Amino acid sequence: MTTTEIDNIAAVSAPEKKRSGVIRRLLKKPLGLISLIVLIVIVLLGVFAQFFSAHDATFTSLQVVNAPPGTPGYILGADQNGRDIWARILVSINVSVISGLIGAGVATLVGTLFGLLAGYVGKKTDAITSWTFNLLMTFPALVLVLVLSPVTGGAYQATMFIFGLFLAPSTYRLVRNLVVGVKNELYVDAARVSGLSNRRILSRHVLYVVRGPIIISVSFLATAAIGIQSGLAFLGVGSTLTPSFGSMTSDAFINVYSYPLQLVWPSVVQALLTSALILLGNAYRDALTDAERPTRAERRAAASAAATRTRMVRARTAGAPDVSSARSLLTVRNLSVGYAQTDGVLKSVVDGVSLDVAPGEIVGLVGESGSGKTQTAFSILGLLPPEAQVEADVLTIAGDSLVAKDSRELRKMRGSVIAYIPQEPMSNLDPSFTIGSQLVEGLMAGMSRKEAKATILQLLARVGIADPERTFASYPHQISGGMAQRVLIAGAVASRPKLLIADEPTTALDVTIQAEILDLLRDLQGELGMGVLLVTHNFGVVADLCDRVVVMRNGQVVETGKVRAIFHEPAHEYTQQLIASILDENTVRTDPAPHSDMRELEETK
Amino acid sequence: MTALLTIDDLRLRYPGRGFRSASPEVLRGISLEIAPGETLGLVGESGSGKTTLGRAVLGLANPTGGSITFQGEDITRLSQKQRRPLAKRLQVIFQDPYTSLNPVLQISEILSEPIVAQGVSAADSRKTVSRLLDQVGLPSNAAQRYPREFSGGQRQRVAIARALALEPRLIVCDEPVSALDLSTQARVLDLLVDIQRNTGVSYLFITHDLSVVRHISHRVAVMYKGELVETGPVAEVTTTPQHEYTRSLLLSAPTADPDLQRERRALRRRLREAAA
């Protein structure tokens, strides 16, 4: 419930967007709409070629050899053989479109089918198909095309079919990797337990989720196929009878010095066709991701909100009375956290929270998910995302006001005065560095590397790690979750902070480990005299550690009190509800199972 | 009366990474029984193999030894095709209601899927869907909505409804309430108990939380490092544990009372010092 909670809140705070279909979002984008129109116009020109041109594409007339554009009946002129360039362009469009369809179609079909199988079925199938496709990638496609040319007769369709096969590995890899990710989702397991056939699971649960990237790759594959076809035709590979952009440019190339314009026409149309395809693919990808991403208007609103707020925490009223007593370690008065929405309305997630932590005191911040407890803790740490608007009358740590501090000053405080222990120990350690190097880094500001290492080793031993030297040199994946939390605690207390903020520090751990970590926290707190703000939803943890409790609901503090008072005579109705819903240790299920005779039977065994 | 589910000396070892490489056994000879209408709570810490045991029963993990018998039928090693008819009698509720529901499907599609897979017509399945939603306390207009529109507790209700769709005899519940808030947790547990009373379904209830186990189980089995260390009626296991691990588990769970917790802490310290 750390960063993910913030993400959730940020997402929830965004207004309920109308979730229109991908196609509609695609058409709303100028890029998507224009490229789609260009594509449709080009394709239609090709399909209805005979209505748009006066001559057949292969009709030759010696009168018009190399005729300039504008010659009657020859809008774009004629080529060196006296053929209508416009008519040939229209037919070439068809050749290109069919090449694209065959190439991309074969590649997508083969790649998707085998990608689904390899990703889903099992390791052996995966290994065999991956080998085959890797081999396919290394095989020189052009050689095969040349070798097979007597069989294919140089027909471009056959050539594109073969190239489609050789383009398949890229789709195969894409689909396979996506499927491997989706396959382990619990909803796929649930579908299997529901008795669905493999075919149905693949088509309904797997393919449906991975379809977006496949559609995008189709546009790139089609472009590649068109390029390959025209390249081959330019080189003169395959039948020279069919007009195509490649053969046209090849013809024009011979006359490039005398009639350079002849080269322009086919190149321009092909460029238009392929770029429209690519841009349409891009627009589709944007349309897919837009569902999750804020619109431009929302981003602008967030940016302007951030711009008006150069300080991390704003004072609500100028010259607010400083009520922090000299005794208090952390003083928070009237803290609010809000997220701006598109319509400019501020959605508040923390609303007027006030709390205190005395030196050496452990205060529990309790509430259910969405109560704003983590947001409160993070605003004290100054770790909220820039969209968050934080305001407070007073926010003071050890007599030092956080209000109107910039992020650099806050960072300094985080290193020395405040420390933090997260919920997920593993995700808070960088997997690519050793534990030692990550811990030493935090101390390097004040001491030499050697001193820092000695301090860290001492601390690792203190937090109950059996072999500090070995753990120091280990990478995060080599240690268990409980060890990782000990490491993070060592890192947090290394700079002897005055205030420790722990966000659900034991939620991800087993009960037996949890008990040890709680013991460790209590001992360290006693030794160092730290104040601790403990964010948790577990009342057992609260009862174990805390001196005082702050209960939050919907961003507001509903009750504050000594731990015994909260547990034994909760004043607020909500606290009473919470306490009542704790699963009582003394009530065990007593109604017998319907066939308790069988149980007795087993007990006598 | 014969047991609904019998697991006998079940062993499981996940395949190693390399060729012929061995990995440690995750299940080391587990034997247990579940009677019709009974809840067996399976407790253990992460890595103890409790989730693997549940997955083996569901056919999502392949045992390397021993047997699983369900309603007199050996289901230890079934092909996926052979397993499909079992869906009617054996179901699952997973821990995480966020990933156990396909985000792109409507609730009605999620719920009707298992019914349609058994060859029921779409019209009949629609009727069943509204009955299911009613059964788990969700409004009937929930059918046309997507999982993302629901809170964690509501999603878990959808997952429960999906498990109930085929009126199974046994539901494997893998930590079904540990991702939920405290108040939601109690309500979902009550719902599960109610459903059991009305339908006579059995639960294999996997959890690490002893208070949850107390609330829902008739009997408790404690797992530790791939073995069952203790099995018995819930009241006995949670008050007079026989095995040392069960004892430490009970003492480790913090109780929601500051004074009791202080005593418990002191007791645990004494035990630990005595052991050391």
Image (tube, rainbow, N blue to C red):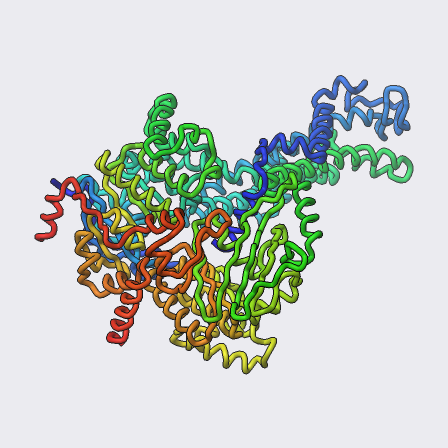
Q: How many marks?
A: 0
Q: Left of A226 or right of it: where is A576? A: left
Q: Quadrant of residue B132?
A: top left
Nearest the viewer among B258 and A261 is: B258
Nearest the viewer among A302 and A320 is: A320
In the image, residue B172 above or below residue A550: above
Q: Left of A158 or right of it: where is A231? A: right
Nearest the viewer among A400 and A245 is: A400
Q: Left of A2 or right of it: where is B35? A: left
Q: Quadrant of residue B49?
A: bottom left
**Which residue shows up at 32% across the image and 49% down it?**
A580
Residue A71, given in percent of the width and then of the height, sits at 90, 23
**Which residue shows up at 33% across the image and 42% down it?**
B188
Q: Is residue B155 visible?
A: yes
Residue A471, given in percent of the width and then of the height, sits at 44, 73
Q: Quadrant of residue B161?
A: top left
Q: Is residue A220 visible?
A: no
Nearest the viewer among A221 and A603 is: A603
In the image, residue B232 above or below residue B97: below
Residue B18, given in percent of the width and then of the height, sits at 40, 60
**Which residue shows up at 26% across the image and 61% down it?**
B250
In the image, residue B29 above or below residue A525: above
Residue B215, given in percent of the width and then of the height, sits at 26, 48
